[in-house]
Amino acid sequence: MSEFRAFSAPGKALLAGGYLVLDPKYEALVVGLSARMHAVAYPYDSLQEPDSFEVRVRSKQFNNGEWLYRVSPETGFVPVSTSGSKNPFIEKVIANVFNYFKPNMEDYCSRNLFIIDIFSDDAYHSQEDSVTKVHGSRRLSFHSHRIEEVPKTGLGSSAGLVTVLTTALASFFEPKLTNNVEKYRNVIHNLSQVAHCQAQGKIGSGFDVAAAAYGSIRYRRFPPALISNLPDLGSAVYADELTHLVDEVAWNITIKSNHLPSGLVLWMGDIKSGSETVKLVQKVKKWYDSHTPESLEVYAELDHANSRFMEGLSKLDNLYESNNDYCAEVFESIEKNDSTCQKYSEITDVRDAVATIRRCFRKITEEAGADIEPPVQTKLLDDCQTLKGVLTCLIPGAGGFDAIAVIATQSVDLRAQTAGDERFSSVQWLDVSQANWGVGKEEDPETYLDK
């Protein structure tokens, strides 16, 4: 595998299942997003030293965005930084891809330098203090700050990075992968889940990695012990245990392809702040443990509302496919967003379910001190619900001050509708839409090259 090749993976919005997705009892709805993380793998190069590999990962959109790691079979493929700059997500991807493929130096002595460039679409980061430049044939935003200093919008940049970097790095060892990502999608997913959990220092639910690998899905998580029971990186048995986990162990995970109803689109509105998901999750867990059995009742109500929300979306999708006069009436009512909406259960079922979800999250916000739907977001969502063409809106994922999610008819233009309206002065509508496809090959890698 010597030619340039490029891959990309989508972002995510967890529309149903926030917090509950951490428990295998509950199912979640994850929508893949058109905002994508990109990785360009360069042709093989060689180092003068024949006894180790070097992986260079570059992110030219951010200040000081280069990470160099040496990797050797002699040290169990544990990456060693040679640049002084470390990134735990990149580091764990390198460790797990090398341990899975177990390359020997004899086969790679003249091709042991791997160079990968990473790019991110604008929607992943707040665009304040950024400059748009043409790079290759693509328009990208470049930031004057380091990557960890630029506020994120909560669309799954770390999961997208891990998944697309895993794919690109694996393509050095498996030549058939580039033109047949589908065949290796499960391997990519499993390796990415391991690397992402290790980089975070905890076993997360994995919905963001699953969306990066598979696109829009209904998701039920894997048992955390699958990853927590792995031996330490660098141990003599790590590579074999990892390979067994990736290739042979049943993960007991639910990943079912899904999509928003035809005729409806997703809008994401960034309020230029962002949230620390880990701290929110910790506060909610503390509340849950100290408020049983009431907290269990709240979760049961949330789960029921999530199910009704997903069922309501499915009914709208089936209705749209019928393409009859009644369907036209329902969608026209959503377009008007007036009192006629109350006539149609297809509309009220979805809105009532989301109202319950939001009410439960406000209760947790108040009792746990975790800003899942803080008052400023409540007002913003209530204002969004009055806009023409809006079916419903909510705080996706862990909530907080990340981007809000709005489901609207495909003909509506929220940018035009909210322009000049003081109620939406803090909102930047992101250039994203639903994406049903997961990680995959980009057909023209030359478009990334700055010639």
Image (cartoon, helix red, strand yellow):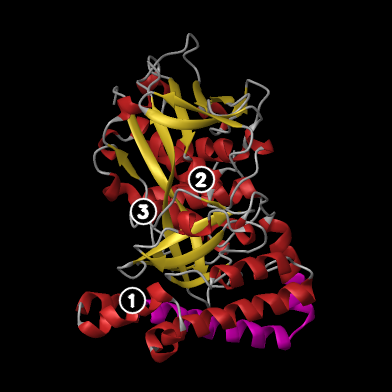
For disc 3, the marked residue is: 186
For disc 1, the marked residue is: 331
Q: Position of residue 115 (x, y in %)?
A: 45, 23
Q: Earlier in the sequence, mark 1 or mark 2?
A: 2
The amino acid type found where label 2 is placed reads: Ala
Residue 403 vertical placement versus 87 (above, below): below
Q: Earlier in the sequence, mark 3 or mark 1?
A: 3
Q: Position of residue 216 (x, y in %)?
A: 39, 61
The amino acid type found where label 3 is placed reads: Asn
| Within-10-Å neighbours for mark 1: few <14, some 14–19, many 20+ | many
Residue 225 visible (yes or no):
yes
The amino acid type found where label 1 is placed reads: Phe
Residue 336 vertical placement versus 36 (above, below): below
Indicate which label's residue lies in the foreground, 1 or 2: 1
For disc 2, the marked residue is: 123
Viewer-closest of 351 and 175: 351
Q: Position of residue 393 (x, y in %)?
A: 52, 70
CB under 8 Å between callouts 3 and 1? no
Magenta stretch: includes residue 310: yes
Q: Which residues are magenta?
A: 285-314
Residue 153 vertical placement versus 22 (above, below): above
Q: Secondary structure at mark 1?
A: helix
| Within-10-Å neighbours for mark 2: few <14, some 14–19, many 20+ | many
Residue 229 visible (yes or no):
no
